[in-house]
């Protein structure tokens, strides 16, 4: 693999229904509204076409089974399709056996749709941590090349400041290896703040995400931006829920598209698959 320019970063989207977070929390009211993902995904694809940019789309298996035409649309545009698992259950709540079955179901279905090998995975809510690190071994055994499920900040429910904040290669106990592409953080002293993704991208001033990406570039590592299609939907139905989740789910939705276009103007992005193919292995630190 050839060495990659430090301005070449990962752009990713977690594709699931807009009401997935409500469904998972047992909150009703979403049933009377229709799906919005085809419109939202099309908006993203149009933006990426305008900026001549490719991205990685982590697609939830249950969503793909219900909406194969959306997955096919993304794939035909030349973007990478990766797995977001099938059930959107946090990994620590699964047994190793259930986790293996979950990722295999998603992987197999996505490969049938795209007729390509699925090499990447992202857990629901970035939920691979010290209590579910065994998930990486199973991913490698199931022929995944990379994972993007670790959040290197203690400000995230499943995160920890002790995690490596840059993409790196992990040597596993089963004598296999896997690349890890963690969530983006902004490092200020010893504190790592979430940045450049989802709620953190739209809630914080743009300069936070811009500076976080520049921090990675300065170290010659690719940064990571992640969003959901509903992050770009300011007209998404507003459901009654607890104050904290309401803020996380709805705050500043009108800013996401603006900030995304600013990022695309200021930095060069691509899919994780392409980054792995272009970046020399000695630049992805083994740990």
Image (spheres, rainbow, N blue to C red):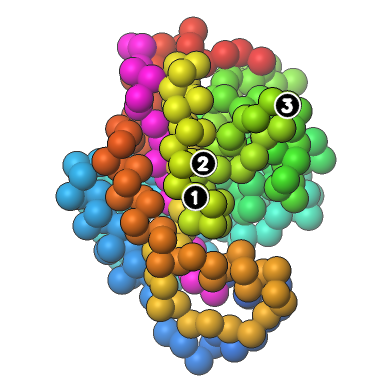
Sequence order check: which comes first, mark 1 or mark 3? 3
Which secondary structure lies at badge 3?
loop
Image location (x, y in percent) of residue 70: 32, 63
Sequence order check: which comes first, mark 2 or mark 3? 3
Q: In the displayed structure, would residue 205 be above or below residue 132?
A: below
Q: In the displayed structure, would residue 121 be above or below residue 222?
A: below
The residue carrying mark 3 is: 190
Image location (x, y in percent) of residue 156: 70, 47
Q: Would residue 86 be seen by someone viewing this image from the given angle? A: yes
Choose between 95 and 157: the one closer to the eye: 157
Q: Nearer the viewer, mark 1 or mark 3?
A: 1
The residue carrying mark 2 is: 208
Q: Badge 2, how many Cα within 10 Å: few under 14, some, many 20+? A: some
Q: Is 87 on the left-hand or right-hand side of 96? A: left
- Quarter occupied by the N terminus: top left
The circle drawn on residue 263 is none
Dots 2, 1 in contact, CB < 8 A: yes
Which secondary structure lies at badge 2?
helix
Residue visible at 67% across and 80% down? 241
Choose between 275 and 87: the one closer to the eye: 275
Image location (x, y in percent) of residue 219: 50, 16
Q: Badge 1, how many Cα within 10 Å: few under 14, some, many 20+? A: few
The circle drawn on residue 205 is 1
> Could you give the CA–CA distance between mark 1 and mark 3, rounded to whole angstroms?
21 Å
| Magenta region includes residue 162 | no
| Magenta region includes residue 7 | yes
Which secondary structure lies at badge 1?
loop
């Amino acid at each position: 693999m050839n060495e990659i320019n430090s301005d070449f970063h990962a752009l990713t989207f977690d594709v699931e229904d807009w009401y997935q977070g409500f469904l998972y929390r047992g909150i009703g009211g979403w049933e009377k509204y229709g799906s919005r993902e085809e419109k939202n995904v099309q908006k993203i694809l149009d933006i990426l076409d305008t900026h001549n940019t490719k991205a990685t789309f982590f697609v939830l298996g249950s969503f793909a089974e219900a909406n194969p035409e959306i997955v096919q649309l993304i794939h035909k545009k030349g973007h990478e399709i990766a797995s977001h698992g099938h059930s959107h259950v946090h990994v620590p709540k699964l047994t190793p056996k259930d986790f293996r079955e979950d990722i295999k179901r998603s992987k197999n279905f996505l490969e049938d749709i795209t007729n390509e090998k699925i090499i990447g995975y992202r857990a629901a809510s970035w939920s691979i941590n010290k209590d579910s690190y065994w998930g990486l071994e199973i991913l490698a055994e199931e022929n995944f090349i990379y994972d993007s499920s670790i959040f290197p900040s203690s400000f995230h429910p499943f995160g920890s400041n002790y995690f490596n904040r840059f993409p790196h290669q992990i040597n596993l106990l089963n004598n296999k290896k896997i690349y890890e592409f963690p969530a983006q953080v902004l490092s200020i002293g010893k504190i790592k703040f979430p940045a450049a993704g989802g709620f953190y991208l739209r809630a914080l001033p743009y300069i936070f995400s811009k500076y976080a990406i520049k921090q990675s570039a300065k170290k010659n590592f690719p940064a990571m931006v992640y969003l959901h299609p509903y992050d770009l939907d300011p007209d998404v139905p507003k459901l009654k829920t607890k104050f904290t989740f309401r803020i996380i789910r709805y705050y500043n939705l009108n800013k996401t598209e603006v900030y995304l276009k600013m990022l695309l103007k200021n930095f060069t992005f691509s899919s994780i698959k392409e980054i792995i193919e272009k970046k020399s292995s000695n630049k992805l630190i083994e740990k």
